[in-house]
Each structure stands twice: as structure tokens, then as C-alpha cells.
């Protein structure tokens, strides 16, 4: 048995899709365990670019089982569009399976996400407006619709009608927005049910069988540790558990079945959406990193905020996820900078903090303490072996390992599959 969870170590967009695709070659099963279409995972294979939101990033290898776990929230029209686009490009979806326990993002969730964000005014979270928060809210307050509900037409109609009536009270009464037509929603979702039926399965059972058969299973996180509902910069977080524990609850595999956790970490930091970001920078260097790294949201197209690598964040991520190894990505983007900085601790009113504070008020008052290192000029994306990297780039990688106590298993120096250096094989 070999099971590996790949987790975002920062605020998302660390390159999880690329690393999942890279490791998927050796996997039998690739599983998404949380999040929804707020995720945008970009794969670049032989010059062709694929942007995935719900389908696991193992899908480009024929013959791999790809599972959307129960912890994911499923936006059916988006999923069907994504599946259609993949099929048009010749991607085989016959081994895609969707958990019968996953919750459905409904049209009223998308509307409420937008209305709630508007009502927050300047305190908005900066969500992706994909209905994620309202869907998880209904899951937790036990008003959710699940994939299994699609299988019984009568039941589906009864449930949707009751839920739409309840949401219309909120939409019309509180937000003064037009309500939804229950019959139209029932008709729409009955149509989706017919298309999606062959893909629905008890995926917890399938995974258990795979574990027992000694298959290699890769769990693909979405978002990142600092966006985790429990461990992130609450309330500027997403509504699910991207951290490694989520891989267990979000798929139905017990924690004892998980062998290892690898953190995916960008060589600098980015964040989309609002909320504190201690190592954030602006000006020429930030603009340069944004342009070279093409740091614009995969899902919303928003320019990403830029900062130096923050090892307070990274050490925290290593701890809450139980990581042993890191996959360092986008190192090539830092080429050409005279110096590169690493945040090693926070200064809060003259006191040095080595650990992530819970209070956002404290975090917002933290000034980053930086260590400065010499940069490099060489284009890393074309160097075959890590051993041939310029000493300054190697020093940077080694310093990250030393500051976190982690082993670096992978160094990525470009979006392509081949621009990936495997330093230690743990899967
Ligand atoms: P994810 O959400 O964690 O999967 O990350 P995204 O796909 O949203 O953002 C990462 C972006 O960086 C994508 O456009 C990738 O193609 C690209 N990328 C991944 N790894 C590297 C790398 O090592 N170097 C460069 N230059 N781009 C990379
Ligand atoms: P991937 O998987 C980066 C951010 C949003 C917002 C907050 C809450 O591509 O790394 P939500 O719509 O989830 O309620 O928004 O979380 N966010 C992401 N940021 N990458 C993502 O996914 C994200 N998914 C959500 O910008 O700040
Ligand atoms: Mg992304």
C-alpha cells in the first residue's frame, strides 16, 4: 500500500495540479477530497494547457481511476461542462467516479454567495462566488442535497421543492432578490441526474478495495492550509478542510490508511481574495513576479497578491498536516532577482513570534522579519539536473529545508511535466 496526500502549504495555487499530474503517472487512483469549483488546477502537458476545477488531476493518464470524494461540493453544470470539454479533447473519462455522498452546489447557493459577499461590504472575504460557503453551510446545518438524492426522481422533486421554498424566503425576504422557480430547478437537476448516473458510486467502498489490493492512491488537495476552515486565517478562508485530515473525512478512508503527506509550496507566496498576508510586497519586484509567474487566478482571473516565502506559514503547515516532505514549485520565477528574501518570524510590537497567531488582529499587526539571500541569473527551466543548478538557487532550496526541518522531494522549474526534478522518490 502506498497512499500519499498532496496538500497546499500556503493560500492555494501552489502548483498542486502540476505535481499531482507528475506523480499520477505512478498512481492507480487519484482522489479529490474537498473544495469545489473554487479550485483551479492547471496542467501543462506537451504544450497543451488543461484547467481543472473538479476532475482530479490524474485524468490525463488513461487507465487511472479518478475519484471525486464525498468531501467535495459538486456544481453539476460546471462538472458537466468540464467533462464535455475534456472529452472533446480526447480525454477518457470512463474511470471517473463521483461519490454518492458528495453534496450538491445548487443555484441558490451561487446566488447567496454573491448576495452575502455584497452585504459584507468592505469586510468581504473575496470568495470565488462559486457557492462554496453556502453549500457547506447547508451540509453542516443538515439542509444539503447529496448526489445520492439524484437517483430517486420523486425524492429529488420533494427535496428540491422544499429547499427552494425555504431559500426563496431568504432571497426575497432578506436580500430583496428574485426567488427561484422550484419546478425549473427540479427539471434542470433531473436532466443532470440522467447524464451523471453512470459515474455515481460508493467511492469509499472503491477506495477501501483499492487500499486492500495494495494500490497506489494519491489524494489531491485543493486550496491550501491557510485557507483551511479550522487552521487558516479565519474568517478569510474557504469553508472546507484542505489540510491532510480532510483527506480522511473527505473520502471515507481511515487516518491509519494514510502513509505520507507532502506539502506543495511555491518558492514565494501568493494569495487571491482578502485577508492578512504578512510577507506581502508591492512595487516593481511584486509586479515582476506576477508577470513572470503568470499569477492570475485560474478560476476568477483576479491578479494574485504577491509576497516572499513565509516560513512561519510553512512551519505551521508542516505541523498541522504532519508533512515529511515538500514539493517546491515555481523556483524558476525567481531567476534574475539580485536578492531573494525569506520571512523567518514575525515582529509583533517588538516581540518576535515564531508561530502563527490565532488572532487576525495580532496577525495584521505583525511585521515580517526577513532573511536576505543572493539571487541567481541562470534560467533554471532548461537545466536537466538539480546538481547543475547555480549554487545560489541550491542554497535557497537548502535553506527552506533547514528552516522547516523538511526534506525536499521535488523541485519544479516550469509548468511542464519534464520541468520537474525528483530528488527523493516517496510514492
Ligand atoms: P494549483 O491550484 O495549486 O493547482 O495551482 P494553479 O494551477 O492555480 O497555479 C499554478 C500555476 O503555475 C499554473 O499556471 C501552473 O501551470 C504553473 N506552474 C506550476 N509549477 C510551475 C513551475 O515550477 N514553474 C512555473 N513557471 N510555473 C509553474
Ligand atoms: P486552488 O485549489 C486560491 C480563496 C478565495 C477566497 C477564499 C474563500 O486553485 O488552490 P471560496 O470561494 O472558497 O468561499 O473563497 O478562498 N480560494 C482560493 N485561493 N486558490 C484556490 O484554489 C482557492 N479557492 C478558494 O479567493 O479568498
Ligand atoms: Mg489554483
Image (cartoon, helix red, strand yellow):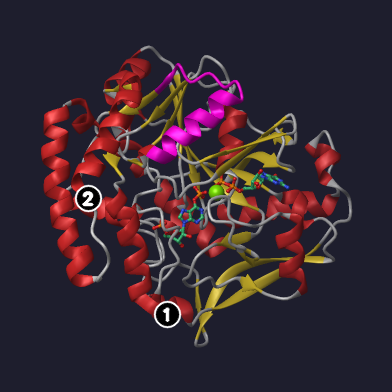
Q: Position of residue 23 (x, y in %)?
A: 58, 29
What secondary structure is found at the residue carrying circle 1? helix
Disc nearer the start of the sequence (2/1): 1
Residue 377 quadrant: bottom right
Q: Position of residue 189 (x, y in %)?
A: 27, 36
Q: Position of residue 291 (x, y in %)?
A: 75, 60
109 over 387 or under it: above or below: below
Q: Is residue 99 magenta?
A: no
Q: How many marks?
A: 2
Point out which mark residue 206 bears.
none
18 over 331 or under it: above or below: above
Q: Which residue is mark 1?
A: 122
Horizontal placement of 195 versus 164: left or right?
A: right
For the point 84% across and 50% down, the residue is 391
Does the rendering let one see residue 236? yes
Q: Is residue 91 magenta?
A: yes
For the point 30% across and 24% down, the residue is 194
For the point 77% across and 73% down, the residue is 284
Q: Identify the main secondary structure in magenta.
A: helix
The N terminus lies in quadrant: top left
For the point 38% across and 57% down, the residue is 238
Point out which mark residue 181 bears.
2
Q: Nearer the viewer, residue 365 or 88?
A: 88
- Give the magenta-colored segment's residue range: 77-96
Q: Residues within 10 Å of mark 1 (few under 14, many from 20)?
A: few
Q: Are marks 2 and 1 in contact (CB under 8 Å)?
A: no
Q: Position of residue 264 (x, y in %)?
A: 56, 45
Amino acid at each position: 500500500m502506498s497512499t500519499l496526500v498532496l496538500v497546499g502549504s500556503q493560500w492555494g495555487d501552489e502548483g498542486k495540479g502540476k505535481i499531482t499530474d507528475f506523480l499520477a503517472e505512478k498512481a492507480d487512483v487519484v482522489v479529490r477530497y474537498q473544495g469545489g469549483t473554487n479550485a483551479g488546477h492547471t496542467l501543462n502537458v506537451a504544450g497543451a494547457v488543461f484547467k481543472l476545477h473538479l476532475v482530479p488531476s490524474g485524468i490525463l493518464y488513461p487507465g487511472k481511476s479518478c475519484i471525486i470524494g464525498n468531501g467535495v461540493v459538486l456544481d453539476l453544470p460546471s462538472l458537466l461542462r468540464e467533462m464535455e470539454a475534456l472529452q472533446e479533447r480526447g480525454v477518457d473519462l470512463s474511470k471517473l467516479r463521483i461519490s454518492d455522498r458528495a453534496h450538491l452546489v445548487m443555484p441558490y447557493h451561487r446566488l447567496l454567495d454573491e448576495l452575502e459577499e455584497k452585504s459584507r461590504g468592505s469586510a468581504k472575504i473575496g470568495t470565488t462566488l462559486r457557492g462554496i460557503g453556502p453549500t457547506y453551510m447547508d451540509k453542516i446545518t443538515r439542509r444539503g442535497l447529496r448526489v445520492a438524492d439524484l437517483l430517486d426522481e420523486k425524492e429529488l422533486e420533494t427535496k428540491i421543492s422544499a429547499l427552494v421554498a425555504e431559500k426563496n424566503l431568504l432571497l426575497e425576504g432578506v436580500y430583496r432578490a428574485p426567488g427561484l422557480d422550484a419546478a425549473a430547478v427540479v427539471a434542470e437537476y433531473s436532466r443532470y441526474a440522467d447524464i451523471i448516473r453512470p459515474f455515481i458510486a460508493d467511492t469509499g467502498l472503491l477506495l477501501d478495495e483499492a487500499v486492500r489490493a495494495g494500490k497506489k492512491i494519491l489524494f489531491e488537495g485543493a486550496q491550501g492550509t491557510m485557507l483551511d476552515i479550522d487552521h487558516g486565517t479565519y474568517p478569510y478562508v474557504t469553508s472546507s478542510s484542505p489540510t491532510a485530515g480532510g483527506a480522511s473525512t473527505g473520502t471515507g478512508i481511515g487516518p491509519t490508511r494514510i502513509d505520507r503527506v507532502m506539502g506543495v509550496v511555491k518558492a514565494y507566496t501568493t494569495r487571491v481574495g482578502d485577508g492578512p498576508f504578512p510577507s506581502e510586497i508591492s512595487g516593481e519586484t511584486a509586479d515582476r513576479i506576477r508577470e513572470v509567474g503568470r499569477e492570475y487566478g485560474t478560476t476568477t482571473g483576479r491578479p494574485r497578491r504577491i509576497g516572499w516565502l513565509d516560513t512561519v506559514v510553512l512551519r505551521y503547515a508542516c505541523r498541522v498536516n504532519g508533512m515529511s516532505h515538500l514539493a517546491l514549485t515555481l523556483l524558476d520565477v525567481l531567476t534574475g532577482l539580485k536578492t531573494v528574501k525569506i520571512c523567518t518570524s514575525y515582529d509583533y510590537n517588538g516581540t518576535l513570534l515564531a508561530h502563527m497567531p490565532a488572532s487576525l488582529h495580532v496577525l495584521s499587526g505583525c511585521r515580517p522579519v526577513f532573511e536576505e539571500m543572493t539571487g541567481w541569473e541562470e534560467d533554471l527551466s532548461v537545466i536537466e539536473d538539480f546538481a547543475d543548478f547555480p549554487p545560489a538557487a541550491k542554497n535557497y532550496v537548502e535553506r527552506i529545508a533547514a528552516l522547516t526541518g523538511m526534506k525536499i522531494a521535488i523541485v519544479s522549474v516550469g509548468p511542464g511535466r519534464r520541468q520537474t526534478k525528483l530528488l527523493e522518490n516517496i510514492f
